[in-house]
Image: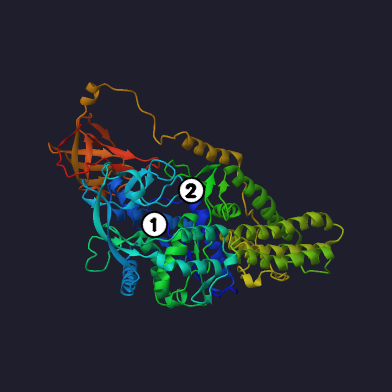
Amino acid sequence: MKTPKRHTITAALPYANGPLHLGHLAGVYISADIYARFFRSNGEDVAFICGSDEHGAAITLRAKKEGKSPKDIVDKYHFSNKDIFEKLGISFDIYDRTSSDHHHKTAQELFLQLEKKGAFVKKESEQYYDEEYKQFLADRYITGQCPKCDSKGAYGDQCEKCGSALSSLELINPVSTLSGKSPQLKSTTHWYLPLERHEKWLSDWMQKGTFNGRQVHDPKNWKNQVVGQCMSWIKGGLQPRAITRDLDWGVNVPVEDGEGKVLYVWFDAPIGYISATKKWAEEKGKNWEDYWKSKDTNLVHFLAKDNIVFHTIIFPAILSELDGYILPTNVPANEFLNLEGEKLSTSRNWAVWAKDYISEFPDQEDVLRYVLCSIAPENKDSDFSWKDFQARNNNELCSIFGNFVNRTLVLTKKYYNSVTPLRNELLEVDVELIKTIKKTPDNIAKAIHSFRFRDALIEAMKLARAGNKYLADTEPWKLIKTNPERVKTIMNISLQITANLAIIFEPFMPKKALDLAGLLNIKLPTWEQAGSDQLISSHHTINEPYILFQKIEDEKVEEQIEKLKNKGQKPSKFLPMKDEITFDEFSKMDLRVGTITAAEKVEKADKLLKLTVDTGIDIRTVVSGIAEHFKPDEVVGQKVSILMNLAPRKIRGVESQGMILMAETLEGELSFVSPTKEISSGNTIR
């Protein structure tokens, strides 16, 4: 099938309850960006859509643990992740958020359309209820023993150890994560999507590529693991799936009897692609329906394997019930990225965080893009190691790509004062190299069309290798003494290769591609110009050479490995217990509940807040090192635990009378140690 010239490209909405790590980037966003940049460079119409997934129980759970509102949590990670994507050159046309009013409106409108068409069934069922907290429990609020692998700590929707999708009712010995007690079953009413109605056409669409009698995609171009997982679900018999939940954070169910209920996050999150497209199209003066309802549009979802079922069964089932919507032409889901031979684990802090990389490897964002693409887990899990990262940078980017570019520019400056020489008669070696230049873009394009980004990158590097070998074989630095006319041809062709490298590497390393175009003193050419051996005209002046890639030294890599080792030495997650104290020593501490009534920054101290605390027996001042985590207006009214009888001491000229107790995560995030129920200031903690 010929690929259309309009592309709606979505990247899985990252959950706004934590930072991004290399697994996220390798699993979804690098590949998606390469795909979008490639088609843009071809002059085709692209809508590259993403945003923060900001609803769901995991966010409310984190908010409760940290004593914050869900909005506090999603605001923090939405802006943090957006900034990281921008610094890594991920070129979203829009990075939206599902907590926005326009998203809520779109999700509610689509719910009502589906409800009117009879796409849902409404039924009463028993769900777990926490009597102490007086609320129904979302799946992520319930843990227990997995019925498939017997692992303890499985969630009500999934066992993270064996990967099985679960129902909370299947868990053995379920426990509420709120109260720590066994929940009770209680009746509630919800809307369900009857997936069993969609089994036949989903099977045909997945295996044959047909929908409503029309060929809509080529099944041979789909990954085996995607088709396999989807068909496994279908053959196992699809079951009705609830699309609403008893929660107070999310998109409200917009019907009379929907009070106290929200749309389940898996239902509203993919609709975020549509609501974001609407917003983007309106801002750009485009028709959003062209990107979601036109048969000439190529709809592709990029995601990791844990999201396959939502994008190959559930979301297509929803789209099929809506008038005129197209289905995805491909869902090129990746497998998972491991780290130094071990499974990535955010709970163990066994991860390389994107923000840390950006901070510790300044101006080397494209190196990370290159390495993560070269090891992308396209068909099976892959592994990131710091030694391999170093080797790929030093041996490939520096010694091959960078070496060729630097030699070309330096010799052009030395021999011709940085002016492109006129090409003379071509020898066979030149003709063969020009053939390589011409065929390279087509080879890359074929691989990208087939979602083989690793192969595409290999093809791009082949041209850099060919250029490097060309210079090594022809040795213009020797030939200049005996045949200067021949050297003109060699350097002209080398400059044409360099210009082609700027084009073909732009999807993979956009910043370095622009740098390379700048060195050549040209505007970055489009993909349609790639393959030409006449990109740089004779007598064109190039700019002053500089080193494009810097080697990464052993010390830098050892430092990163040591950081990981230190993380690995904390399997319990926490610092070891301090020395024992007696009960009498403990009883001397006067711990009470207090309320912060005022807060301000301490002058010339970035980390300190001056807090006024009502302890129930007096009003006192406490200086606390929390200014990097909380703004003054965020803590006023906060219930806290305060150590009352700590000897006063002056901190930056302010007398502090006590200490506020804080909990700290491995990532260094702070939260208040607060009572879980309303309790007056002055009450003791024991």
Quadrant of the rendered structure where residue 472 is? bottom right
Label 1 close to label 2 by CB (< 8 Å): no
Alpha-carbon neighbours of circle 2 within 10 Å: few (<14), some, or many (≥20)? few
Residue reaching furthest to the right: 482
**Residue holding disc 1:** 79
The answer to whether 656 appears left or right of 479 in the picture is left
**Residue holding disc 2:** 359
Q: Amino acid at mark 2?
A: Ser
Helix, strand or loop status at disc 2: helix
Alpha-carbon neighbours of circle 1 within 10 Å: few (<14), some, or many (≥20)? few
Q: Work out whether residue 462 or residue 302 is closer to the camera in this orientation and state it.
A: 302
- What residue sits 66% from the left and 62% below the top? 501
Residue reaching furthest to the left: 617
Label 1 vs 2, first from the N-terminus? 1
Q: Work out whether residue 647 or residue 666 is closer to the camera in this orientation and state it.
A: 666
Q: Position of residue 560 (x, y in %)?
A: 53, 40
Q: Is residue 297 above or below residue 367?
A: below
Q: CA distance from mark 1 to mark 2?
A: 17 Å
